[in-house]
Amino acid sequence: MIAFSGKTFFLSALGAIIAFCGFNIWVPVIEVWTTENFPARSRTTGFAFVDGVGHIGGGAGVLLVAYLLLLSVSPVIIFIMIAVFLFIPSAIARFGVKTNRARMDEISP
């Protein structure tokens, strides 16, 4: 929606609001889900590792988007790439290990 809005502020703002809401639906789920998949004794270390890799990936993504903008890639292609990289972790969280209503000792080895 943002890529197709052109110079229309309302459509850009609406697209940004939708993207923000979608992002905030999946990020808490993914962060909690990653901690539940580590053994209890190494849970904080595992989460720190996953969180650090995520921040590195976010920084690399910003650099990649800036580089693609220099190559005059269409904004539509860039937003599709961003959407794909948001879809992948949401699919992993959706179809990953089921942790709902399970005890911690059942979830983590």
Image (cartoon, grey):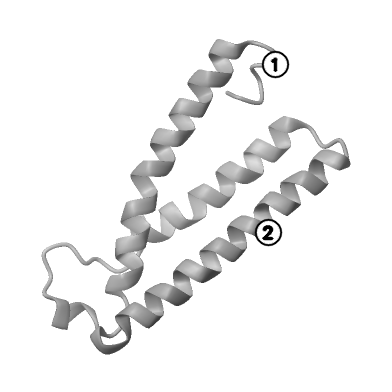
Q: Position of residue 72 (x, y in %)?
A: 86, 35
Q: Is label 1 or label 2 in front?
A: 2
Residue receiving disc 2: 60
Q: Nearer the viewer, residue 87 or 30?
A: 30
Task: Give the left or right position of residue 84, taking residue 34 as reference.
Answer: right
Is residue 109 something one can see in this rendering?
no
Task: Give the left or right position of residue 47, taking residue 5 as reference.
Answer: left
Q: Position of residue 95 (x, y in %)?
A: 35, 60
Q: Name the residue at 38% across, 42% down.
A: 24
Is residue 91 something one can see in this rendering?
yes
Q: Amino acid at mark 2?
A: Ala
In the picture shown, does residue 82 fall above or below 34? above
Q: Position of residue 49 (x, y in %)?
A: 47, 76
- The mark found on residue 6 in the picture is 1
Q: Nearer the viewer, residue 77 or 17?
A: 17
Q: Name the residue at 21% across, 67% down.
A: 99
Mark pair 1, 2: CA separation: 26 Å
Q: Residues within 10 Å of mark 1 (few under 14, many from 20)?
A: few
Q: Residues within 10 Å of mark 2 (few under 14, many from 20)?
A: few
Q: Name the residue at 63% across, 10% down.
A: 8
SS category of the residue bearing label 1: loop
Quadrant where the image shows the N terminus: top right
In the picture shown, does residue 32 fall above or below 26? below
In the picture shown, does residue 29 fall above or below 51? above
SS category of the residue bearing label 2: helix
Q: Position of residue 103 (x, y in %)?
A: 11, 75
Residue located farthest toward the right when viewing the structure as drawn: 71
| Location of residue 77 by image quarter | top right
Q: Name the residue at 57% across, 51% down.
A: 85
In the picture shown, does residue 28 fall above or below 31? above
